[in-house]
Image (tube, rainbow, N blue to C red):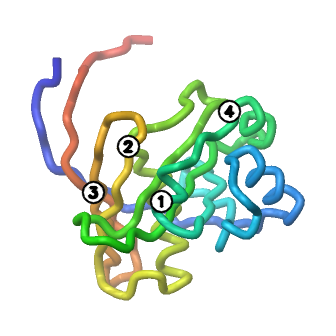
Amino acid sequence: MCLRKYPSRATRPEPKEKSIQPADLAELASALGVDLDSIKASATIDVGAVWMTLQLSDADEVLNLRPDMAKLSALIPSGVTGVTVFGMISDNTGADIEVRSFAPTEGINEDPVCGSGDGCVAILVKELGLIRKPSYVASQGRCVGRNGRVEVRFADDGKILIGGHAVTCIEGIIKI
């Protein structure tokens, strides 16, 4: 049973980026079930959690993905959490970007709402000038029946703030 709702907002650590090699991009496209030409931008981004982050042609392409999780698992290097994909939304849904995060090597085929994945997306969005306003809303989780909204703000000091409303579904204490 979920206990309470509360607003939350967090900054992302200073990111570290690496390019993804063309041969690896081709393999990722195949595992995701898209043409290589559908990948518009890519980088492996470390914000504490490390995500291979890919911009696809549009939100519909992101929503229609049916990844081959076995293939995807084989392509995720050690030390990388998974693959986050995003596409721009062109209709008026109340969100600007559709995001999906896949982490099959971590036991999570698809994370319904992933703050670190959205943080990596925000870094590419900012670098590429995809959204020129100080904030945007990302939609995530629709494909797993957990429609979520993530608010992303670009602060004046250059930091990226990730937030929204969260629901505590379980609480506990672990003693070691």
Image spot of residue 24 (x, y percent): 84, 56
Does the residue at mark 4 contact the one at mark 1 (Cβ under 8 Å)?
no
* Residue linked to disc 1: 60
- Crowding at dot 1, Cα within 10 Å, few <14 / some 14-19 / many 20+, comes out as some
* Residue linked to disc 2: 141
* Residue linked to disc 4: 69
Give, as a three-letter code, the residue at label 1: Asp
Give, as a three-letter code, the residue at label 2: Gly
Q: CA distance from mark 1 to mark 2?
A: 14 Å
Seen at 40% across and 82% down, the residue is 131
Q: CA distance from mark 4 to mark 2?
A: 17 Å
Count all numbered tags in the image, as a single digit.
4
- Crowding at dot 3, Cα within 10 Å, few <14 / some 14-19 / many 20+, comes out as many
* Residue linked to disc 3: 163
Secondary structure of the residue carrying numbered label 1: helix
Split into 4 quadrants, where in the image is the C terminus?
top left
Does the residue at mark 4 contact the one at mark 2 (Cβ under 8 Å)?
no
Q: Residue furthest right?
A: 23
> In this rendering, which labeled residue sits more in front, label 1 or label 3?
1
Residue 46 falls in image quadrant: bottom right
Q: CA distance from mark 4 to mark 1?
A: 20 Å
Seen at 19% across and 35% down, the residue is 167
Say whether residue 131 is left or right of residue 68. left
Q: Of the two numbered discs 1 and 3 on the same chain, state the one appearing first in sequence.
A: 1
